[in-house]
Image (spheres, rainbow, N blue to C red):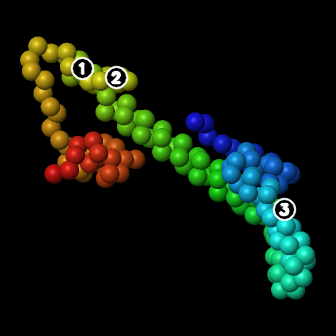
């Protein structure tokens, strides 16, 4: 997944409203495209049912909605792009953590990163590296969380 441009999302939504919102969120674009029709249907239903309360309340709701419609689309667009980019960043961190966890060890004990499983090139039996303390791990992994530490090294 690629990151989405916040500026592009705002510009598209500013100029095209709910159609521009499709860049940031497909479900948001659908909801904002269909909501005027739903509110209009309620207004027509109220008029046909001769319900003054339903006509008045749906008309008032449509007026409030019409005034804030574009603003709602822009806010939704910004929120959707930020959430998407946060998810992309989280996946990148997870992939980096997996790349860090899977490495090969050469005879000079220098770790070399790899995208496959751990291979140890020694004649002796494989040694399991000592578990670092939480403080050592946090110092070596400043962007890691305590959850990452326990996921890698297990609890206890």
Residue 53, above or below 117: below
Q: Which x, y percent locates residue 154?
A: 22, 46
Q: Quadrant of the N terminus?
A: top right
Give the residue number, with chain letter if any, for mark 2.
Answer: 116
Q: Which mark is residue 63?
A: none
Camera-nearest residue between 54 and 106: 54
Quarter location, residue 115: top left
Residue 98, above or below 31: above
Q: Which mark is residue 119?
A: 1
Which residue is found at the position 86% from the left and 67% from the top? 40
Question: Given contact means CB atoms under 8 Å apart, are the residues at marks 2 and 1 in contact?
Answer: yes
Give the residue number, with chain letter if any, for mark 3.
Answer: 37
Q: Which x, y percent locates residue 79?
A: 65, 57
Q: Residues within 10 Å of mark 1 (few under 14, many from 20)?
A: few
Question: Given contact means CB atoms under 8 Å apart, are the residues at marks 3 and 1 in contact?
Answer: no
Whether residue 18 is visible, yes or no, is yes
Number of labels in the image equals 3
Secondary element type, mark 3 = helix
Residue 70, above or below 111: below
Which residue is found at the position 23% from the left and 50% from the top? 134
Q: Single out the mark in the foreground, 3 or 2.
A: 3
């Amino acid at each position: 997944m690629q990151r989405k441009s916040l500026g592009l999302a705002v510009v598209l939504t500013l100029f095209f409203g709910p159609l521009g919102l499709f860049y940031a969120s497909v479900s948001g674009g659908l909801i904002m495209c269909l909501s005027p029709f739903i509110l209009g249907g309620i207004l027509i239903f109220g008029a046909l049912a001769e319900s003054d309360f339903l006509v008045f309340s749906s008309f008032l709701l449509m007026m409030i909605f019409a005034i804030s419609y574009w603003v709602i689309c822009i806010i939704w667009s910004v929120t959707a792009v930020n959430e998407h980019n946060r998810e992309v960043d989280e996946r990148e961190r997870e992939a980096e953590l997996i790349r860090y966890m899977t490495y090969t060890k050469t005879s000079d004990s220098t770790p070399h990163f790899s995208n496959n499983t751990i291979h140890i090139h020694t004649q002796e039996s494989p040694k399991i590296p000592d578990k670092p303390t939480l403080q050592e791990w946090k110092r070596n992994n400043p962007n890691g969380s305590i959850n990452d530490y326990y996921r890698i090294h297990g609890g206890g």
